[in-house]
Image: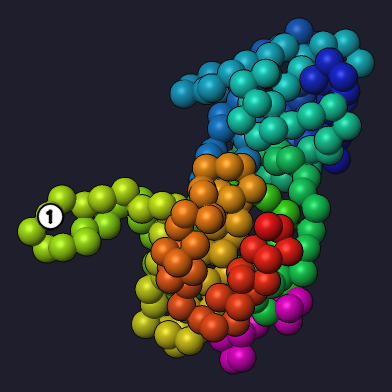
Amino acid sequence: MAKISSKGQITFPARWMKIMGGVATGEWLFFHIQHANQIVYITKDSGHSDSCAQLLGQNFLTIPSDVRKWFKIQPGDDLKFGYDANREAVYFKKRQVLLTCPVCNELGSIGELPCFVCEETGSVEKEPWLNEITRLMMKSRSYNVSLSIIGHERVQENQAPVQLLVPKIQLVSSTYSTAILETIQDYYQGRVIREAIEDGSLNVQEYKTEIVSMLRTDFEKDSLEAWLSANS
């Protein structure tokens, strides 16, 4: 773990420099952003890198501004390091607050099936819905689940697709039941709707009926109605 300073710097942990084969003061390091996994690889290879920085004295390393901007890294945030054996590379990610998995409630499973939302850990990181969905799109494949984000939809067969009020979340799987998929789908759809209302991009007074109709389960419809009443 390393903490970001007010100058956007960290003290690069010696353990990870050793894994990289040692890094000398003044040596250039290269940052490779992996948007899908929300991680950044640090290598001594410049190939297809997004940014670079020199290792300074006392093992200080400045995290490039574009990397900090993309991951919303602020002074005081912690970076969590790891090692990808497949790529043989060190990586870091912003440490997020851990929450109880809203689907399996810390069990790591849904009935007799593994919970793909938390990858069977029982907890999820607190992050914007788009970041979580992007990560989940990659990870859910190994659980035989296909996840899509739909921005446009055809209202009538002979008409061009129209833009939806908010992105539509769709889950398909031959392993998980329709009831399970609709519950998880509604959880994310509800998050999309709430964040759109909170940031002012969705007028709830004008489109309330259409918004609620995007949900499948009575539980999530009632939950959204209660949230709208509390925040009106």
The front one of 5 and 165 is: 165
The front one of 129 and 60 is: 129
Give coordinates of residue 114: x percent, y percent. 59, 80
Q: How many marks?
A: 1
> What residue is rendered at 69% in x and 33% in y?
72
- Quarter of the picture containing the N terminus is top right
Give coordinates of residue 65: x percent, y percent. 67, 18
Q: Quadrant of residue 88?
A: top right
Identify the image's colour scheme: rainbow, by chain, secondary structure or one colour: rainbow
Give coordinates of residue 7: x percent, y percent. 84, 15
Considering every residue shown, the one lying at the far top of the view is 26
Task: Name the secondary structure under disc 1.
Answer: loop
The front one of 55 and 140 is: 140
Q: Main secondary structure of the magenta part?
A: loop
> What residue is rendered at 66% in x and 34% in y?
71
Q: Amino acid at mark 1?
A: Gln
Q: Quadrant of residue 119?
A: bottom right
> What residue is rendered at 54% in x and 38% in y?
34
The residue beneath circle 1 is: 159
Magenta span covers which residues?
A: 105-116
- Quarter of the picture containing the C terminus is bottom right
Relative height, residue 8 to residue 110 (above, below): above
Considering every residue shown, the one lying at the far bottom of the view is 112
Q: Is residue 182 visible?
A: yes
